[in-house]
Amino acid sequence: MGGGRKNLKRAVEEDTLTLQPGQSIMQVVSLRGSNLIEVMDAKGEMSLALFPAKFQKSMWIKRGSFVVVDESGREQALESGSKVACIVSQVLFHEQVRRLQKSPEWPEAFKSHVSDKSSRDVPEPS
């Protein structure tokens, strides 16, 4: 396996995650294609986020995943007419989500949305 994207891999392996000013945790609602995803914030507002090319082929997301987005320029982007309001800065994996749920940084709105479907791949009977 190649050693490319070392900094990206290091950021994933970090145990502690602290949100910087302008960053927030959002849930992926749908994948739009062309590096665009639709995300929902803790207030229930939907917006489009850019999934940067540096994450391609190294991180995958699906509906229901949680991501950390940088929304520092969100208001300015929406005022200028841009549909993309924020940029994904980190993908949260299952272990990171479980750790964050216990911290005060985790939004109350997402506490009921977290499921353990990612830990088991058994289809539910219909």
Image (spheres, rainbow, N blue to C red):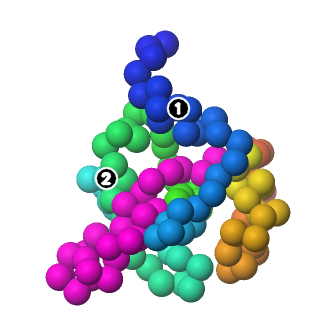
Query: Which residue is depicted at the point 68% across and 80% down?
Result: 109
Three-letter code, disc 1: Lys
Horizontal side of 79 relative to 35 (left or right) equals: left
The range drawn in magenta is: 69-93
> In the rendered image, which residue does mark 1 sit on?
9
Split into 4 quadrants, where in the image is the C terminus?
A: bottom right
Residue beneath the point at 65% across and 39% down: 14
Of residue 123 and residue 94, the one placed in the foreground of this image is 94
Q: Secondary structure at mark 1?
A: helix
Q: Which mark is residue 35?
A: 2
| Secondary structure beneath label 2 | loop
Q: Amino acid at mark 2?
A: Asn
Q: Identify the image quadrant of residue 114.
A: bottom right
Percent of width and height locating residue 65: 58, 57
Q: Residue at x 47, y 32 (%)?
A: 7
Measured as percent of width and height from the top left, residue 13 is found at 63, 35
Q: Is residue 91 left or right of residue 78?
A: right
Q: Can the viewer see residue 39 in this picture?
A: no
Residue 29 or 19: which is nearer the viewer?
19
